[in-house]
Image (spheres, helix red, strand yellow):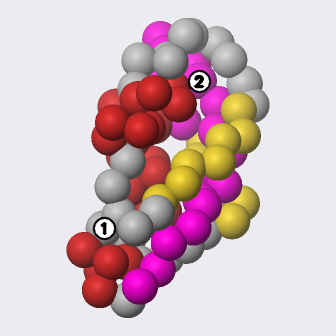
């Protein structure tokens, strides 16, 4: 499931690590009929590359087609 995928794949960016940043990115998006996520909205960002990393993680996951909208919290911790 997605939480297990995040446990294995979510990593702080070097920029966030160097600035002692950790926390949660809250992101909203939808999944089209082909299973591709789109329409990303950062509801609560961390900056330091973490927002982009959250989008990358979502893009690489295998989603069920046609689910929308989804709001997720992606944790980045040291």
Q: Secondary structure at mark 1?
A: loop
Q: Position of residue 13 (x, y in %)?
A: 30, 68
The disc, 1 or 2, on the residue closer to the chain's N-terminal end is 1
Q: Tell me the crowding category of disc 2: few under 14, some 14 to 19, or many 20 or more residues within 10 angstroms, Cα based.
A: some
Q: Position of residue 11 (x, y in %)?
A: 33, 55
Tell me what residue is drawn at x 37 percent, y 77 percent: 16
Residue 7 drawn above or below residue 17 = above
Residue 26, magenta (yes or no): yes
* Residue placed under numbered mark 1 in the picture: 13
Say which quadrant the C terminus sits in: bottom left
Magenta residues, as a range?
20-38
* Residue placed under numbered mark 2 in the picture: 31
Tell me what residue is drawn at x 33 percent, y 78 percent: 17
Towards the viewer: 72 or 12: 12
Residue 52, magenta (yes or no): no
Residue 26 drawn above or below residue 71 = below
Q: Tell me the crowding category of disc 1: few under 14, some 14 to 19, or many 20 or more residues within 10 angstroms, Cα based.
A: some
Residue 4 drawn above or below residue 73 = above
Towards the viewer: 48 or 67: 48
Towards the viewer: 37 or 26: 26
Disc number lying in front (1 or 2) = 1
Q: Secondary structure at mark 2?
A: strand
Q: Position of residue 4 (x, y in %)?
A: 45, 27
Tell me what residue is drawn at x 57 percent, y 67 percent: 23
Q: Position of residue 65 (x, y in %)?
A: 56, 10
Q: Residue furthest left?
A: 14
Report whether 2 appears left or right of 17: right
């Amino acid at each position: 499931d997605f939480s297990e995928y995040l446990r294995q794949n979510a990593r702080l960016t070097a920029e966030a690590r160097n600035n002692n940043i950790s926390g949660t990115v809250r992101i909203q998006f939808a999944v089209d009929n082909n299973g591709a996520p789109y329409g990303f909205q950062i509801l609560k960002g961390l900056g330091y590359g973490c927002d982009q990393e959250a989008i990358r993680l979502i893009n690489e996951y295998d989603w069920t087609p046609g689910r929308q909208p989804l709001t997720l919290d992606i944790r980045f911790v040291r």
